[in-house]
Image: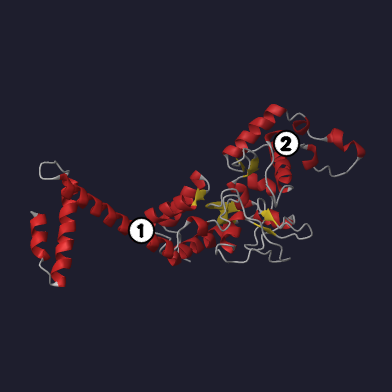
Amino acid sequence: MAPLSWRHHTLLQALLHRGPLSERDFHAVFAGVSGKDPATHQQLSNDTLLKINKDLAYLQFELRACINQYDGMVYYGVVNNIVDEESKLGTKYSVPQIAFYKGLLEAIVQEAGTDGSITSIDALNVRLDNQVVIVDGSEDSQSRLPRSIKNFSLSQKEKTLDELIRDRWLSYTSTGKIGLGTRSFLDLRSWFRGNDIPSCVVCNEACIKASSCLNEGCNVRIHEYCLKKKFSQRKASRACPSCGTEWPCQDGEADGDDDVNEPGEDQVSSANRSSRKKRKRVKAELVEENNNAGPSTEVPRRTLRSAKAEAVEAAQEASSAGASQPGRGSKRRK
């Protein structure tokens, strides 16, 4: 197998140094090192990613893409494929910080399929003792919790929360709540599946923030960005794929108003005809004013031009009729 080239190393270095990159930024780096736009050279892009992942597989790493379910944007990043949540956070975080993150993760996942977020107050009230497993299971297990877990203060939680958001394990949503970050969506794909998180019927990915069917007995959930694709056509049926219940429109989604706001071809042609008639009527009025004004009256330049145009049209009509009116038309032009 041929070794990775400097282009592959540059892509990896950008992802490892800058963290997960948006699709736009990743494509910009790819175009910079290859000289070609991955949007128009998809085969080259796929071959490059495949080559990188074959070499990263020896280290149990993977270059992966995901969709941030809160903003619908695609991100690329390098992830650890070892099925161990602690190892995914690395050695930067302490044991109580990792336990705090796991508690936040569970609290957010409990809201999966709806808002997929929790308030800052709920985040700071997350308990850490539920995230530590005491092997012997004795009655005094609570008293045998590590001192770092029991003494993890509120200020330490606030500091850890800010750090997790800064490192993009968590994020602030558009409503000001706390949700999962891009790195969590990248790294925890297998964890979502292993913990029976409801999946989207369109893309089959875990539904952390999604829309649910109105039928209480139906468990179908669909991401908001998947809904836009599924019901993109105006005449497409908005029925639930499982129970047939009418799917509600999302915030900001058109509900048949586009046809009302956008004029049809008949309306446009009618408007054009009305505009032409109006211009002819104005011209006729200006010509009449000019004829009635007399030779000593000052007429605006625009009025004179309109009068000349009207005179030319009258002359053409008269000549086609074979009458003697061209002479009078000529006098008008003078």
- The type of residue carrying mark 1 is Ser
Q: Residues within 10 Å of mark 1 (few under 14, many from 20)?
A: few
Rendered residue at 64%/48% (across/down):
88
Q: Secondary structure at mark 1?
A: helix
Q: Is residue 4 left or right of residue 65?
A: left
Viewer-proximal residue, 245 or 112?
A: 245
The numbered mark at residue 78 is none
Percent x, y of residue 280: 27, 57
Return the disc, 1 or 2, that comes first in the chain's sequence: 2
Q: Quadrant of residue 174?
A: top right
Can you give x and y, in whole percent of width and height, for residue 304 in the image?
Answer: 16, 49
Query: Horizontally, is 255 left or right of 296 in the view?
Result: right
Q: Is residue 8 left or right of residue 237?
A: left
Give, as a three-letter code, the residue at label 2: Asp
Q: How is the image coloured?
A: secondary structure
Give the number of callouts: 2
- Does 249 sit above or below residue 173? below
Image location (x, y in percent) of residue 316: 15, 66
Q: Quadrant of residue 7?
A: bottom left
- The residue under the point 62% across, 40% down is 175
Find the distance from the CA under tag 1 to the CA under tag 2: 62 Å
Q: Position of residue 230 (x, y in %)?
A: 59, 63
Q: Residues within 10 Å of mark 2 (few under 14, many from 20)?
A: some
The disc label shown at residue 274, or none? 1
Determine the residue positioned at 51% across, 60% down.
259
Which residue shows up at 15% across the image and 60% down it?
312
Q: Which mark is residue 122?
A: 2
